[in-house]
Amino acid sequence: MSYRYTLGQENYLFKDLKDLLAKASPLRSGDELAGIAAQNNTQRIAAQYALSELPLSTFLNEVLISVEKDEVSRLISDSHDKELFRSVAHFTVGGLRDWLLSNEATGEKINKMKMAFTPEMISAVSKLMRNQDLISVASKIQVISQFRNTLGLKGHLAIRLQPNHPVDDPKGILASTIDGLLYGCGDAVIGINPATDSPEMARKLLWLLEDLRTKYEIPTQSCVLCHVTTAMEIIKETPVDLVFQSIAGSQAANESFGINLNILSEAYEAAKDLERGTVGNQVMYFETGQGSALSANAHHGIDQQTMEVRAYAVARKFDPFLVNSVVGFIGPEYLFDGKQITRAGLEDHFCGKMMGLPMGVDVCYTNHAEADQDDMDNLMTLLGVAGCNFFMGVPGTDDIMLNYQSTSFHDALYLRNVLSKRPAPEFELWLQKMGIIDERGVKIDSQAARKLLNAI
Amino acid sequence: MKQDLKLTDAWRRLKEFTNARIGLGSIGNAMPLEEVLALKLAHAKAKDAIYTELDTEDLKKRITEGLNLEVFEFRSKVKDRNQYLVRPDFGKRLGISNSRQIYPPSDILFVITDGLSASAVNNNALEVLNILVPEIRDQFTLSAALVEQGRVAIGDEVAELFNAKFVAVFIGERPGLSSPESMGIYTTFNPRSGFTDEKRNCISNIHQNGLKDFQAALILKFLIIQSFHLKMSGVGLKVDLKSLIS
């Protein structure tokens, strides 16, 4: 079905719902690359007007990718709570925006409605929201997840310690890990991206982290971010806490990652059965990012932000402990500069929280994007205010394996300080016990260093 | 007021184990100024690496004279570096049609392309090939191609021209701060245009402080032998590193 809107003397025609969503999207290079972006600024605003008047039920009647062709669409359709939807069925997209911003819509209320919304509805409403609105609504929603500690509580901010090394050298990885722990990082997870995806390497690195964690009784979880099928190969005889996988918003895009919903289900069940968590047993760690579907040529003509939110439907099925949008990693062909990366990071965090996910963001950029550390300072501060569950902690921002810049251990100190946030409660107690931070959360130079140095 | 406000990290000696920026010390919550400036300088160098060019004359000479392999030159649809950055689709496709020319059928085709750091392949590609080629040339027929302004997937299209059973794409990776010259190798068995990443195996981080040339050659040889043996490449093919590098 096509959509029309008249602005003054000008008539605008959008050929279908996909087209309307794409044209209403704030400008980004990925939608231009796909040839679906608005042709000019006025057309974009016309699309936003048209979108604002659309009843939410439109998204139930006009599916973007047919359920026959795509298992993600099937999942979205099957998991939509039609009963719950009745209470929001009267909303237009614009009406939903207003309700979300109203004082009546508390975080609890929004969270209770999460299964009433499809990813497409959430994507649509985000397109009508300014950055401020995305922060304002997201900051109301608390999504808590648990494994060996508790993440997502208001007033807390967790960090994934990311001690990558270009040849997976165990001592190199340990050195970065110890550095990070001594800066108070590692409560979200100690997660290594292996340079080479092999069962042997994953096994070796998982035992390395397991030995460190048990020796110092660190209340956190570890993960080697290998392919889900690699994790499955070793899960029986290796200490696997969290199972990692990159996911996307269509079946074809997931196939390009070598996965499908069945594979994820098997991994989810297998990891849950290990019962390695202490305060909870949420075992999945997913990463996403706008543009991944387009880069696999599996976007079905849909704008990259809507595809991203569809990926969250995949994540939501498996009750994850961590979901992380690696927002600036994909490069300038999808998010050209600091402005586009900032917008996308705020959208992803908002949409993830609306879907009920424990969202973190890898605030990052590559050297071929038009961005620098100042842009990252801005985005991490904005996301901190928005209540983002976790960020990355990379030594000096510089990931020497993945070749990009993320947030640093120092950034964690900065954010916790200016926003008055604390680490995950269980982890904070450990940091204090070790003498790494004091009761005010301030880093102290201490004996802790000497103790941890014995690990290497 | 104190003169030196920097708090040094007592664990600085850990720096000997990694090139990661650890033990930096701090001023309040911030990085010390010398570390901030060092980071900015590295970023500037990495940005500059993106604009280096494939040294086709030198590479051609070293492949034909040093390795005695035939070399063919190609160019993607990309017109310049700035377009390369925003149009990855152009970087995956060959520019002018080369279909009329006859290319020698080859078991294995080595594709060398600039990617995001031409200096990475200028400095590392031949080092790997010099080790690998003598070890496999009796078993396989080999050819080489140089591609300007290319992305990984262009290897599949070039390989089709050679009817190659296996393609290894040597490409400059995104320049990192500590490694503006990092090379990756992507391999595909039975390459066809339109293949996506799950069909490929990858060896990454080949540079001075990363994976060494001889290690990359060893893994590449393993991937070649396994791919021809199992008639596959990609996520289904796991690299048994323990038996390879110790």
Image: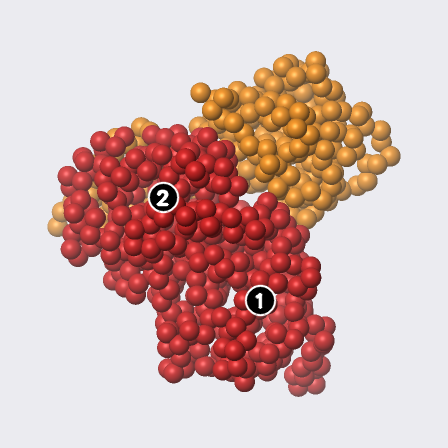
Chain colours: A red, B orange
Give the residue drawn at x 52%, y 73%.
A81
Indicate the secondary structure of the residue bearing disc 1: helix
Which label lies toward us, 1 or 2? Answer: 1
Q: Residue at x 25, y 51 (%)?
A: A427
**Relative to A212, is B58 above or below?**
above
Q: Position of residue B128 (x, y in %)?
A: 58, 22
Q: Position of residue B207 (x, y in %)?
A: 50, 28
* Residue farthest toward the left in the current orientation of the protein: B1
Give the Cα separation between the discs numbered 1 and 2: 33 Å
Residue to which mark 2 is pinned: A222
The kind of residue on which mark 2 rests is: Ser
Residue drawn 61% across and 74% down? A59
Is A220 left, or right, of B121 in this rendering? left
Estimate the x, y position of residue A215 in percent, counting from the top left: 24, 37
Chain assignment, label 2:
A
The kind of secondary structure element at disc 2 is strand
- Mark 2, other Cα within 10 Å: few <14 / some 14–19 / many ≥20: many
Residue A78 badge? 1
Q: Nearer the viewer, residue A169 or A39?
A: A169
